[in-house]
Amino acid sequence: MTSVQVEPGSAAPPPLEPDHKRFAGGRRIVGGGPLGIGVAGLWLTVIVLLPLAAITAKSFEGGWSGFVDAITADNAVGAIRTTVSVSVVVALVNVVMGTLVAWVLVRDEFPGKRIVNALIDLPFALPTIVASLVLLSLYGPNSPIDIELNATKPALVIALAFVTLPFVVRQVQPVLIEVDREVEEAAASLGASNLTIWWRIIVPSLAPAILTGAGLAFTRAIGEFGSVVLIGGNIPGDTQVASQYIQQQLEVDKPIDASAVSVVLLLIAFVVLLVLRVVGRRSAKREGADS
């Protein structure tokens, strides 16, 4: 807050409002009020809460025992296990490669940098089944590079890494831009090696963003369908992911089983996002206390 000097004998000016409560012109920022809250609540209810409630109710139409039987069936357990394990690998791959890509985009200058930066968002715009078709053409039976990966777990990793790469890059990139390079230069002048600077200064600053990006990539991967539908193979107990299992149950007229597995995926995603929120809040408090 800007300090104001008062001349002796003059009346004290009214206290300034905090910067986050006013515009540059001095106008106060106001919220949406009851109407805005009501519209937002109604929209979230219609778009999010009602569908979630409907699928949860559907999954329990056969009772608790029916729900347990649906999620403990051999193929259901295999699909969930494959989905979670592959998604964890994809999240870890994205932590490394996404951070590296963000580092290059922020710290390096090279021809075509703007094009590369734009390509990062391509998986968000491209229909995911197109990605599966492209990957099948590259790694399928008639691979032009003689690498056949279709119907294997590495194919699932590649497909899911493609559609989730932007999450880590776009989380890390703005944080990396704001990192104070003077601290790095000071550490280097004191004799710190590049590795020490990376682990002691840069990584702690990027850790919350990296964790958030990895969590978002993981939650996107566990529900992905289009990018794996062609190249994954859909082999029960091996390369069949949960989304393909859900579709299979719908095709054989078992909507309750499909809903039960869907609820399991929703719970996994909710827990991951909740943990990320808690960790992010604690990190923000810690940084505030340090400053």
Image: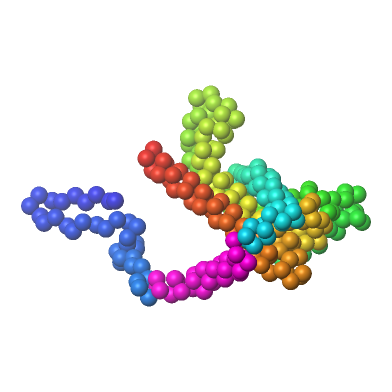
Vertical side of 226 occupied by 143: above or below: above
Vertical side of 220 occupied by 201: above or below: above
Q: Is residue 63 left or right of residue 182?
A: right
- Name the spot of residue 25 as percent of width and height, x first: 32, 65
Q: Is residue 244 left or right of residue 4?
A: right
Q: Residue at x 48, y 36 (%)?
A: 182
Picture quarter containing residue 29?
bottom left
- Residue 158 visible in the shown view: no
Residue 263 in magenta stretch: no
Q: Which part of the image, by quadrant, shows the C terminus?
A: top left
- Name the spot of residue 221 as percent of width and height, x first: 67, 55
From which residue to which does the magenta span run?
36-64
Give whichever of 243, 88 is nearer the camera.
243
Vertical side of 187 occupied by 59: above or below: below
- Residue 44 visible in the shown view: yes
Q: Is residue 182 left or right of residue 234?
A: left
- Name the spot of residue 103 as percent of width and height, x first: 61, 44
Q: Residue at x 39, y 38 (%)?
A: 290
Give whichever of 188, 56 is nearer the camera.
56
Q: Main secondary structure of the magenta part?
A: helix
Q: Residue at x 41, y 41 (%)?
A: 286
Residue extending farthest left: 9
Residue extending farthest top: 191
Q: Is residue 193 left or right of residue 30?
A: right
- Name the spot of residue 137 as percent of width and height, x first: 85, 59
Give whichever of 216, 191 is nearer the camera.
216
